[in-house]
Amino acid sequence: MAASLKHVDRTRLHNDLAYRVAWLRDFIGFDKDAAQALHDVAPLMGPLVPTVVDAVYQQLFTYDYTKQVFLRRNEGFAGKLAGSLDELMLDNEQIKFRKDFLSVWAKKVFTANYDDERTWQYLDKVGLMHTGAPGFKHREGKEPLHVDLVACEILLGWVEDILLGALLPLPADVLPDDKKHAAIRAVNKILWIQQDLFQRHYVRTDEENAARKKLLVGQASTADPSEKIKQWAVPAAAGAVLVLLVQKVLAQLA
């Protein structure tokens, strides 16, 4: 007999964080065993966090596109800011400040209580804060932090590669193969969920896109025709002048 079909409430999926996380966990199989697999390797991965964080910033500093984000001041940092990309170095005070936040996140991946809704609220706010919204209280009323989604996504993929690269070479006497395999799968699952908790704050739903399109079409259809004529008049006048100039040049060459 076929398995019973599970119902998903699409509205709640987009508006209810706990409901969304529950469905994501069920779909990808991030259960208690997966959480335990992360906890099992926490003593091995914890000491590697500083190295991973340093590697992340070295990678981000490879491109002006990802480096320029760090010219903005972080809440809680009162030191001197670099004035340009050339002045911004890995040993800059604010970079050290930001590394602390990333270190906390990396440690939570392996130690968090995934049965506690506050863990998922934290991971959701990590995504939200990169959109310019104050995901955490310390960001309220401060200069917004804007990071393009593409940069966030590819960084998560890069971090996963680093973490798995640290796990794979561990010998069986340090980490038995069954626990290694379980940890690798768990890292993949939790980072995919984290990626979704970024996307939900960047990507519009189909309904939002439809409403936006309808609004833009409505604005275009109700625009004053005389305004359109004014918009066309300037290019038309410029075109007429250009024609006269060309004719004058041709006459001189004749």
Image (spheres, rainbow, N blue to C red):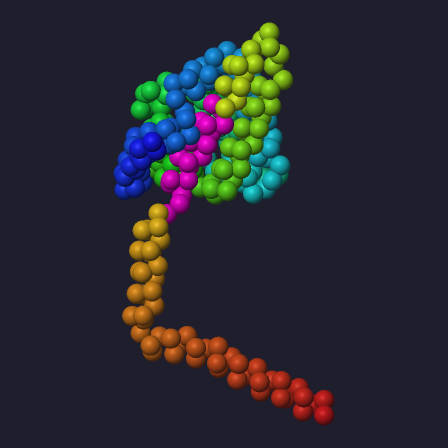
> Where is 94 relative to 216, above or below?
above
Q: Which quadrant would the C terminus be assigned to in this image?
A: bottom right
- Closer to the camera, 229 or 32? 32
Point out the stretch of residues depicted in magenta.
186-204
Please check the rendered image and state whether residue 188 is part of the magenta-colored stretch, yes or no.
yes
Residue 133, position as x, y percentages in the image: 36, 39
Residue located at (56% from left, 14% from top): 177
Horizontal side of 219 relative to 174 (left or right) equals left
**Which residue is at the far right?**
254
Residue located at (72% from left, 89% from top): 253
Horizontal side of 202 relative to 65 (left or right) equals left
Principal SS element in the magenta part? helix
Residue located at (33% from left, 20% from top): 115
> Where is 125 relative to 231, above or below?
above
| Residue 225 can be seen, yes or no | yes
Residue 151, position as x, y percentages in the image: 51, 40
The answer to which quarter of the image holds residue 121 is: top left
Residue 7, position as x, y percentages in the image: 29, 37
The answer to which quarter of the image holds residue 113 is: top left
Horizontal side of 32 relative to 9 (left or right) equals right
Please check the rendered image and state whether residue 189 is part of the magenta-colored stretch, yes or no.
yes
Residue 119, position as x, y percentages in the image: 36, 23
Residue located at (53% from left, 81% from top): 239
- Closer to the camera, 57 or 48? 48
